[in-house]
Image (spheres, rainbow, N blue to C red):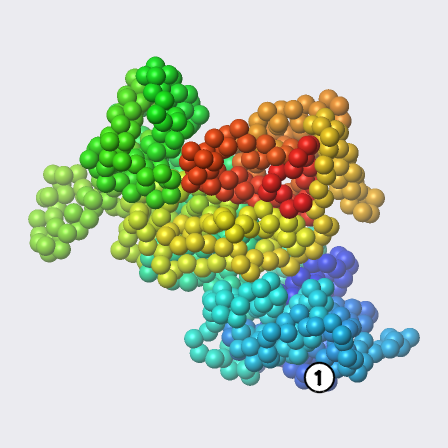
Amino acid sequence: MTARLSLYRKAEQELHKLDLSIKTDFYDFCHAFRENPDQPGLVKRKLKGDSRIYRAEINQHYRALLTRTGIDADGTEDWLIIAVRHRRDVYEELQVAVNRVTGEIEFVDLAVVGDSALRRAGITLTPAEPDDTPKPPVAGPAQPEAAPALLAGYSADDLRGLGVADQLIDLALTVTDSQELDQLVEGAPLLSKDILYGLAAGMGIDEVRKEITTPVELRQEPDPDDFAAALTRTKVTTVDDAVQAVIEEGDFRAWKVFLHPTQERIVHRHYNGPARVSGGPGTGKTIVALHRVKHLAEQLSPGHSKPILLTTFTKNLTTDLRLRLASLVEPELLARVEIAHIDQLASRVLGENTAPGRGKQRVYDNVALNEMRQLFAELDDRRWEPEFLLEEWEQVILGQSVPTRSAYFQARRAGRGRALTRPERNHIWKLIEQFTARLDKLGVETWGQAAERAARYEIERAAKIQARRAYKAEVGGKDLIHRDASSGMRYLNYRYQHIVVDEAQDLRPAHWKMLRAMADPDLPNDMFIAGDTHQRIYDHQVALGALGINIRGRASRLTLSYRTTKEILAKALRVVEDKHVTYDDLDDGTDNLAGYRSVLHGPAPTFTRYRSWDDELAGLASTLRAWREELSTGGNGAYRDPSGRIAVCVADRDMVSQTMYYLVTKANITCAELTKDGPKGDGEVHVGTMHRFKGLEYQKLAIVGASDGIIPRTNVIERYRTDDPPRYEREQRKARSLLFVATTRARDALNISWHGKPSPYLPV
């Protein structure tokens, strides 16, 4: 009799934490088990509480818990290792089942549940192998508790209907605080964990069902006794000789990239049009986007073309995506994916459609704003603010590719603030004509202009493709070869079969028009969009439906953070939670962070006030030294390089320079500046503006200079308070989002400081 072994997710996590010697013993155990699962040396015994679970000896102290999932025609048995642990942590009451919602195998681990919760539920755990020195039972008879239940508003039927494992329902209804809930869900299946955390975070039953249960629910209720079918739905790792090296290297978790079941369903779903996934920082939107690319690449027909585009807003994020995708897919699949940031893509389109020597230099908006101010000064025109006019041009005229004055009279200006009369639009159009003529004379164009031109070229290209299809359908293919030969259209096709966009909230309307024209709208799975408007740090408002990208009915939301601790998240949410502030959903609706939560714990963020900027920098240096010491020793005396794990975040470039100068010259702390191309230099502490931290994460993060007047810049936005209230609200929302992005870059520790009065957005 031989056997095949697979490793359950929880067992994989437990194995990762064990010493190398135990991992080696585990490999030897697996080899022996596959040779003969019934050999006496394995000391295989059934648990009394669930006869489907067996315990077997890895070595003198450690046990593998297994369940048999099937047997092949040739007699080979299939076994699933569901846990790897010390024998003192193996109890007779442990259970395994098939979840009624997902159809996956679930291992319910009561060994980690707190004693008080077990007592209230009347559960006593019996050690399968009592120690030589007997200990009292883990739990005794139920005791009355004065504290109200955390989930008192829900019934057992509510939890069962949502998909909570049966063995956890009574326990969950007795939990009285978040600490007990944390203990309960530590050993819970992932779906149960998500549901219980969602309910505890304030999500209603209908919302939990929509956001958590429905995305992973099977169409037909599974057979609770069919473990073979359940195994096909369960994420496992096959245990064979190939895992030995991974185990011995001590990095078992690197064996695969983890996807939560909710994320996995989004990744593998078939969409009949554009789809979008949203969620707060750290919920795995980028991971989902990368796995979506992998999934799409695996479905491609053989070839050497690049029919998949992966794009995002900035160069440094694109570099990060390329590195992460390379670790996820095989080189031959990676070669089928075009990875480019959105402005790089627009530049390529313009290069294809511009004669040599006729291209223009591209400049950033601050350069264009200076030219606008000079024009106003020369005209002595004080009717409009240069900033307002530049945004009107960028967001309305360029954003909607408005070609003429008459078209501008009809242009939609949603979210732009005050309404404009026809004479006012006429005056603005004249000023814009003079402004663009000025840029043209200088031989420059903004990135917004470049995006709009690229979009027009791609729209024209798509129109030719559609015209060719219509003609082919009309004539049935007759005369198509001759027509193509004369028009040069024989090889004209859409550039991409699939487009995946990360950090979608920061793209301009023209970018979306260009992307829409690059993929065939008649094919399924054409666009996959990941973003969070709470993290929009540029003023690029879009409504995808108005741009030809219909995501209705194909939108998903992630609510569980895998990066930020509960303690940091609670403070970060208060930055963007304001009853007067709303966030769009990249369409005509609104978005929120209801149910957004974390399963991680860590120290509470610290908030410190200083009398002056110099005092604040001195305090920062002390904090960084303490963090450096903590990380470099790792708690066990062995030196570890802390470089790249600590960062300092500030509001603007001047503060970057001042902070780095102080740390290097007065505190002897080496620094690397965060630039658009990534960290510049090899300093141990990364320093950058809030904009540069988009998409990054650090183990320990300090935000300095978080003072009123700096966040937000009072001298910039106060002039809009009475003259342009909608613009004032937009600037406030953008500043909140920037601080929200900064606070959620911290993984384990967050320190926020200011001098004088704190920013009004800080939760202090």
Does 613 sit left or right of 485 as displayed? Answer: right
- Above-or-below relation of 350 to 374: below
Q: Residue at x 68, y 52 (%)?
A: 567
Q: Residue at x 44, y 78 (%)?
A: 220
Does 114 sit left or right of 289 as displayed? Answer: right
- Label 1 neighbour load within 10 Å: few <14, some 14-19, many 20+: some
Q: Residue at x 36, y 38 (%)?
A: 418
At which x and y percent is residue 414?
Answer: 34, 44
- List the residue tagged with mark 1: 49
Screen quadrant of the C terminus: top right
Camera-side residue: 119 or 106?
A: 119
The number of numbered badges drawn on the structure is: 1
Camera-side residue: 539 or 557?
A: 539
* Residue at the farthest right position: 133
Q: Residue at x 69, y 58 (%)?
A: 16
**Residue 350 placement: quadrant:** top left
Screen quadrant of the N terminus: bottom right
Query: Hey, what amino acid is under mark 1?
Result: Gly
- Above-or-below relation of 584 to 342: below
Q: Can see residue 183?
A: no
* Residue at the farthest top position: 378
Camera-side residue: 526 or 230?
A: 526
Camera-side residue: 461 or 732?
A: 732
* Helix, strand or loop status at disc 1: loop
At which x and y percent is residue 631?
Answer: 75, 42
At which x and y percent is residue 358?
Answer: 28, 22
**Residue 407 placement: quadrant:** top left
